[in-house]
Structure formats: C-alpha cells, structure tokens
C-alpha cells in the first residue's frame, strides 16, 4: 500500500469528528433511506443496506436508531429523493480531491461544492480526472496503545478474516481489505476484542503530495473545511500529505 499512516490525522481530528457525530448519523440515515428504497428493508436480501448498517455500527450508531431509519424509509419509500453525486477536482499545488455527496437538490450541492473549490483557489474538474489516482479499500486503524494483542496475532486474525494487507506504523496498525470484505474483517476484529479508532471503506491515494507553501496550505484547508461543513457532503478524499 502507500506506506503513509493516516493515524496522526485521525487522532488530530477525533475531537472535531466527535462534535460532528450528529452529521455522521444524518449522513448514514440518508444512506439507509436510499438503500431501503432501492432494495427493500431486509438486509439479508439487500447487500447495499447491509453495508450501510455495518457502516452505522462502525460509527457507534444505536441499533434502535438504525431500526427506526429502516422502518421510516420502508413506510415512506416513495418520498425518498436523494441522489448520489461525485465531484472531482484540484486544490492548490495540484492536490487531488474527490467529493461524495447525497443530495435532494443537485443544483444546490453543485454550487456549494464549486464555491468551496473556488474560495480555496482550486478548480472543479471533469468526472474521472483524479479518481484514477485512488484505490477504493476498506481501512481499519487500530491504536497501538489501545491494543493488547501483539502484532503477529492481530495480523493473522485480520488475514484469516479476509484482509488483503497489514501494516505496522509507529503508533498504529493498519488493516486493508477489499471493499466487500471490510464489514466481515471489522466484525472479526471486534469479536476478538479489537476496537478500531477508525474503520471505513475509503479512497486510498496511490501517492501523497506535500505542500510547503503556507498560503497553499491555508487555501486547501479552507476548501476542505467548507466541504466538510456542507450537509450534503458525505465524504471528502484527497492526497494531501498532512504529516
């Protein structure tokens, strides 16, 4: 894999993410609604819904909240009008950025995303202009200080559950999976008593890019902050090396 650890960034952002937990639940709630509308309320027969439920549990969403979301979507299926949209572009210094959104108003979302890029001195590109620089992977990150299992045992547990790769970093262990194996590996680790600091299907950059210009850093951070504050935006991926 990239050999670049996201652990420091995750720990740095954890307090901010905890404060944004309400937004995370809102995002997942929308995903549940769309999944139920598209494939029905039974996760045993709706793989997309099963994936969203796994994501919800990885984010500590209460079971009763998940169940309420499914029942609500099943009862009002015809009123769910959210659509998935993806935007790609460049920030300062050629930093590649991918924005995933789930929206009921594409014009509003497109305008907000374009504004975020413009205010950070970046630009929206065409579909596919940067996504080829990323690989979709499940990524499970374990804090060494919180892990009682030794590295070899953790690696074997992960690989036996279907993981593709395992890396030991200075402060963390990183487990990589195929997207469709992520939930199984995540569940296996939790059954073994391992509670990750982060667990998600994400986009992993093939190469990371450092910025040395302070103005470029400030502009890029402005773009990322504006995108993450947008209620329609589900996830933002980039190849900026923040270390």
Image (tube, rainbow, N blue to C red):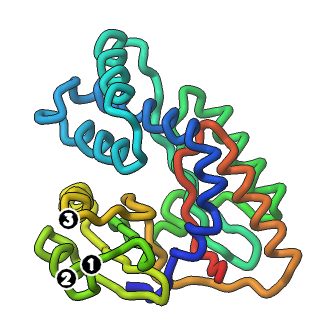
Tell me if mark 2 has few (under 14), some (14-19) or many (20+) residues whose alpha carbon lies within 10 angstroms of its own.
few
Q: Which residue is mark 2?
A: 153
Image check: 79 left or right of 15?
A: left
In this rendering, which labeled residue sits more in front, label 1 or label 2?
Answer: 1
- Residue 193: % across, % down: 25, 63
- The quarter of the picture where residue 236 lies is bottom right
Residue named by callout 1:
149
Q: Position of residue 210 (x, y in %)?
A: 68, 85
- The secondary structure type at the circle numbered 1 is loop
Quarter-of-image position of residue 67: top left
Which one is in front, 207 or 126? 207
Expressed as whole percent of the image width and height from the top left, the position of residue 194 reads 29, 66
Please report the residue visible at 53 percent of the width from the left and 43 percent of the height from the top: 101
Quadrant for the C terminus in the image = bottom right
Element class at badge 3: loop
Q: Does any portion of residue 189 appear in the rendered image?
A: yes
Residue shown at 56%/67% (left/top)? 10
Which of the two discs, 2 and 3, labels the residue nearer the N terminus? 2
Q: How many marks?
A: 3
Which label was assigned to residue 1?
none
Residue pointed to by mark 3: 192
- Write the residue at 19% across / 82% down: 153
Question: Is disc 2 in contact with disc 3, using a CB cutoff of under 8 Å?
Answer: no
Q: CA distance from mark 1 to mark 3?
A: 9 Å
Mark 1 touches mark 2? (CB < 8 Å): yes
Q: Residue at x 24, y 55 (%)?
A: 183
């Amino acid at each position: 894999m990239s050999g670049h650890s996201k652990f420091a960034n995750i720990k740095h952002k954890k307090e901010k993410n905890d404060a944004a937990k309400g937004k995370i639940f809102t995002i997942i709630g929308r995903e549940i609604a769309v999944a139920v509308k598209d494939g029905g309320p039974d996760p045993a027969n709706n793989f997309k819904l099963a994936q969203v439920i796994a994501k919800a549990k990885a984010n500590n969403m209460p079971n009763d909240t998940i169940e309420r979301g499914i029942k609500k979507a099943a009862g009002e299926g015809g009123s769910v009008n959210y659509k998935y949209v993806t935007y790609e572009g460049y920030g300062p210094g050629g930093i590649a950025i991918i924005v995933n959104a789930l929206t009921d108003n594409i014009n509003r979302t497109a305008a907000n995303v374009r504004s975020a890029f413009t205010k950070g001195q970046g630009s929206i590109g065409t579909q596919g202009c940067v996504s080829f620089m990323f690989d979709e992977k499940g990524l499970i990150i374990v804090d060494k200080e919180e892990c009682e299992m030794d590295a070899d045992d953790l690696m074997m547990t992960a690989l036996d559950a279907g993981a593709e790769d395992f890396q030991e970093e200075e402060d963390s262990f990183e487990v990589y999976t195929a997207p469709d194996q992520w939930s199984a590996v995540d569940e296996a680790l939790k059954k073994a008593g391992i509670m990750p600091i982060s667990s998600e299907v994400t986009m992993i950059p093939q190469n990371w890019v450092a910025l040395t210009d302070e103005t470029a850093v400030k502009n890029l951070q402005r773009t990322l902050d504006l995108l993450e504050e947008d209620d329609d935006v589900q996830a933002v991926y980039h190849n900026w090396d923040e270390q």
